[in-house]
Image: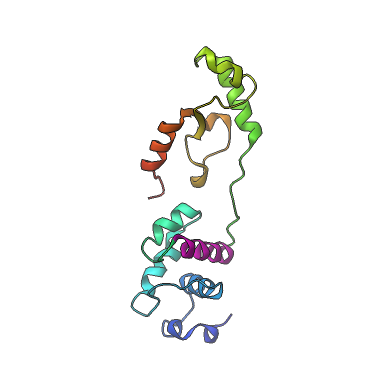
Amino acid sequence: MNDDAAPPFLQAYGRRSLASDLVTDAVMVGVPVRGVRPSVTGKLGNVANSGAKNWNQFQAATRGQFSSRAEASKAWYAYKKTNGIPAGTVRSSAAKSQYLKQLGQSGKTPKWMNQWLTQGKVPPGYQVDHIKPLSIGGKDAPSNMRLLDIETHKTHHRYYRPWE
């Protein structure tokens, strides 16, 4: 696409930027981008310069720019497409099972959990958490996993936001 093909509100800014591509793609997929006018397009430039590589970073960089999560989600889809960001994080059930079996053999858990852990299953009331979140580059490996009770896990994710 050349500069002449840019939407009228972006032509005043000269060369197209990643931010203008983001806005153009968002508009093309039907996302009404709130406040897209010359005085606000500078905010969208922060998205382009932020280096957002995942949903969490994108949310932090675009806080307050969309009127709903659905709009933000559509814009994220367009942003990923424009920047060649692969979709999704692959989680390995084999790595999780391996972690749980190792934990059961370690003797560091209450004995009642062993009936689940030795089979590679999560005990009732617990969840496996990634110490360094996958969304910021953590590995899906047993060395990056821990077993947390559900309430602790919910509290952890309510307050721990490494991308902000």
Residue 84's place in the image compared with 128, above or below, is below
* Residue 32 x/y as whole percent: 46, 73
Is-magenta flag for residue 78? yes
| Horizontal side of residue 38 vs 126, given as left or right | left
Q: Which residues are magenta?
A: 69-83
Look at the picture and state if 60 lies above or below 98. below
Is residue 139 highlighted in magenta? no
Question: Which of these two is toward me, 10 or 59?
Answer: 59
Instruction: Determine the residue positioned at 61% across, 21% down.
Output: 101
Q: Position of residue 118 (x, y in %)?
A: 63, 19
Residue 53 is situated, as x and y percent measured from the top left of the image, at 50, 55
Q: Residue at x 44, y 81 (%)?
A: 10
Colour pattern: rainbow
- Magenta stretch, main secondary structure class: helix
Q: Residue furthest left?
A: 39
* Quadrant occupied by the N terminus: bottom right
> Which residue does the image show at 42% across and 37% down from the upper left?
154
Quadrant of the rendered structure where residue 11 is? bottom left
Is 4 placed above or below 36 here? Answer: below
Q: Residue furthest front?
A: 124
Q: Position of residue 58 (x, y in %)?
A: 45, 58
Name above or below for residue 37 compared with residue 64.
Answer: below
Give the tally of numbered discs: 0
Quadrant assignment, res 99: top right
Residue at 43% x, 57% y: name it. Answer: 59
Along the line of sight, the residue nearer the viewer: 112 or 133: 112
On the rendered structure, is 126 left or right of 151? Answer: right
